[in-house]
Structure formats: structure tokens, C-alpha cells
Image (cartoon, rainbow, N blue to C red):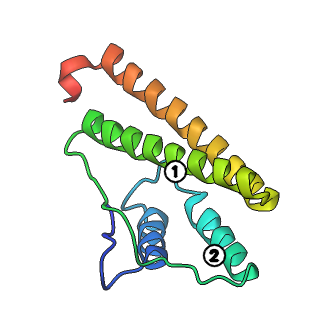
Amino acid sequence: MLGKIGATCSLRKTLEYNEEKVIQQKAICLHAENFLKDADELIEHVLYLEGVPNVQRLGTVHVGETVPEQFKTDLQAEKEMLMLLSEGIAHCAKVGDYTTRHMLEDMAEDVDEHIDWIETQMETVKQVAGPRYE
């Protein structure tokens, strides 16, 4: 179960909704424990730099109909995030913002671990369950 992010629902509210469903044991959460913390850290850092964080421009939430399909959409989202973080790291290095660069490098490391985990799960499903899981 996923809360949808839209014009009337912020990222924070969606994450809180999902967290509540996990607490109620009506959903399971895979690798989401750091999302809210990362979002808060980035927002605080933007405010510290006297910027205005824009959390209204959000991407689409993709939900697979089967477990392998969900892993595939999750893997694509993680790879896109890693690409964005890599671009941000390169930009920070170029302009000499080493504090932000370090934050983004830590996030990229977490994303890379998520990618490895998802790929392992996809391979396990393929080997153990094969077409029965689809």
C-alpha cells in the first residue's frame, strides 16, 4: 500500500501515511527508513544556506502489480536517484560546496546499497520461484 504524492499531499504527509500503515502492520516497508531523515536533512541544509526548498516538484510513484514488477520499478527509481545524486556531487565539487557534497555522497552510498539489495532480491525470486511468482 502506498500513499500517493500529488497536489494535495506533500512528500512528508505521504511518508508519514506509509509509516503509519507499517506501524499498524497493514503494509511492509523495504528500505524506507532513511527517506524522511534524508528529506529533513536536505531541507534543513537548504534553509541553512538561506535558500527556499521546493518540495512541490515531485516525481511519479510507480507501483508494480507483481513482486518482480515492483522490484523492477524500484530498481529503476533507485538508478535514477543515483544518477541525480551523482550529478549533484559533481556540481558541488565544481563550486566548492564540500558540505553538501558529503551529504549527497552519503545518500548515494545508501542508494547504491539499495540497488545491490534489489538486484539480489530479483535474482533470488528468479532462481527460487521463477514464473510462479509472476
Position in image of residue 31 (x %, y %) = 53, 48
Q: Which one is earlier in the sequence, the residue at label 1 or at label 2? A: 2
Is 16 positioned to the left or the right of 39 in the image?
Answer: left
Look at 77% across and 53% down and name the residue there: 102
The amino acid at mark 2 is: Ile
Q: Quadrant of the C terminus?
A: top left
The amino acid at mark 1 is: Leu
Is 109 positioned to the left or the right of 3 in the image?
Answer: right
Q: Is residue 15 above or below residue 30?
A: below
Q: Quadrant of the N terminus?
A: bottom left
Q: Nearer the viewer, residue 44 or 15?
A: 44
- Residue, disc 1: 84
Q: Nearer the viewer, residue 74 or 68?
A: 74
Question: Of helix, strand and loop, which one carries label 2?
Answer: helix
- Residue, disc 2: 43
Look at 49% across and 76% down and name the residue there: 12
Mark 1 or 2: in front is: 1
Q: Residue furthest front?
A: 94
Is 98 positioned to the left or the right of 106 in the image?
Answer: right
Position in image of residue 7 (x %, y %) = 30, 82
Q: Is residue 66 above or below residue 56?
A: above
Position in image of residue 39 (x %, y %) = 59, 68
